[in-house]
Amino acid sequence: MSLLDQSLGRAKRSRRRPAAKAKAHRHTAYNKVRNPYPPVDGVSADRIEALHNTSLRVLEELGIKVLLPEAKAILVKAGARLADDDMVYIGRDMVNAALATVPKTILLKGGDTKRDIDLSPGRIAFQPAGGCPNATDLKRGRRPGSRQDFQELCLLTQHYDVLNFLPPLVEAQDVPNALRHYAFMQDQVTLTDRVPFVFSRGTPQVLQGFAMLRIARGLSEAEFQQQVWCYTVINTNSPRQIDIPMGQGLIDFARHGQMSVVTPFTLMGAMAPISPAGAMTLSHAECLAAITLTQLVKPGAPVCYGTFTSNVDMKSGSPALGTPEQYKANLIAGQLARFLDMPWRSASGSACAVADAQAAHETQMGTWGAVNAGANIIMHAAGWLEAGLSVSYEKFITDVEMLQIMAETMTPVEVSDDDFAFDAIAEVQPGGHFFACQHTMARYQTEFYQPVVYDWSNYGTWIERGGQTATERATGIWQAIVDAGSQVNLSEERQGALEEYIRHATAAGGAMPES
């Protein structure tokens, strides 16, 4: 028996307390985290302005390749110059006019008001892994992603309040491409109440995704367009290219008033210059081009500034994450977002092949870099391995521990008179201990953070309990959550209407992704 257990037992016996009450619960608000730390600058303010001006020069003098005819037409009509090779040259006046109409804050609506996400300065929202083709866990090994994997990962996301968004966790490769978006949306709205994700894979799939979400939320077309109910991620094809699906996604989401998160994937030394400032100059230029397109489609359309800039291993060309270079790039990205006065998205993640110490360190370094840079959205913060090639169930759990601890560090410290504990200090004699004093007894169940997967027992006790690592203990935790099933109740009427919509759309052949 531990010293704390012995002390608490003695206190209960000596004071003849009444029968034990129900265990108190620690109140947390991980779904409403506000970052209290001042953003850290990576470079001086004059260098940020110079970087921004260089990005404008890139768009004016070097241009960006736009493959979607409609997107080119919209840009040219507004004054951009089009060359025969699909290169579009965008003047800074166009960019500045677009930036003047960009929303400074965005409110995303969840399936429950407690799931609404406020993307305003200081607000921070975490997401688990997204877009992975493979899933892995200690029970079933590494495998191509399936619908079952997607459903299970939805349940894990729903279970933890610190995960605010629902990303495209894993590709359900056992569902045909033309039908996958039906399963994807159905599972999101029936297994979670989080803000859902809609892939930008062509207008038919996007519009059907919107329709299914309206059914699930009980919204009219007008109500849907009046607020932001979902989001997509637009990855430019670095360097300097917006492909057809991404260009169409920018247009479709802007027209319907839903949020695009513009995110160039710029790896230093590969698809971006090798220097952090050079990589961010390219990333910023691509962001500005995409943002400009959204505002030309619909001034005031919700769009989020996004970056995912790290470096590669120059010995192999493989992505490297959680590096000092990624950290520095995040700091610059935060400054650029503040320079534009826009909400912004960053990312963490790991390039490691397995859920080990390296993977944990990489994810934590990447996440802290985004936190210190003032990011509103931090993607890939739980479960991401192999630079996005797989999502690990065990790492999902151990990363949640890290995120909850980070959220705790952002919780304001209580400073009431009782917190000063003068009476407790008076009660305990010199050389004594505070285990059984009144102040401790009143607070011991709720004062400290209680871990999800950490084990703070000594070596002997740890061996007696099986000697499992944190990764091994995480298996039992995710299994219990999955076995408990969905805790979300969609009304029978909406559930039936959604299933009927999917039946009719499936019978009509679905909708293939556009390329």
Image (cartoon, rainbow, N blue to C red):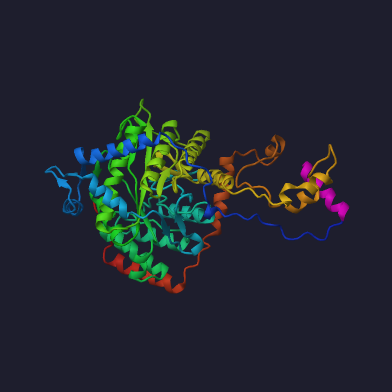
Q: Is residue 146 left or right of residue 365?
A: left
What residue is rendered at 34% in x and 65% in y?
A: 225
Q: Quadrant of the N terminus?
A: top right
Specify the quadrant of the image occupied by residue 388.
top left
Comparing 395 with 202, the one in front is 202
Specify the quadrant of the image occupied by residue 493.
bottom left
Q: Is residue 462 left or right of residue 323?
A: right
Residue 50 drawn above or below residue 256: above
Residue lying at the far left of the rendered structure: 84
Residue lying at the far front of the rendered structure: 46
What residue is rendered at 48% in x and 36% in y?
A: 362
Q: Is residue 1 visible?
A: no
Q: Is residue 231 left or right of residue 364?
A: left
What residue is rendered at 30% in x and 34% in y?
A: 272
Residue lying at the far bottom of the rendered structure: 493
Q: How many marks?
A: 0
* Residue 53 belongs to magenta span: no
Which secondary structure type mostly characterizes the magenta part of the structure?
helix
Residue 54 drawn above or below residue 486: above
Q: At which x and y percent is residue 505?
A: 30, 66
Q: Is residue 304 visible?
A: yes
Q: At which x and y percent is residue 154?
A: 47, 55
Comparing 21 with 326, the one in front is 326
Q: At which x and y percent is residue 277?
A: 35, 33
Q: At which x and y percent is residue 308?
A: 38, 41
Please give the range of residues in magenta. Answer: 1-15
Q: Is residue 151 left or right of residue 60?
A: right
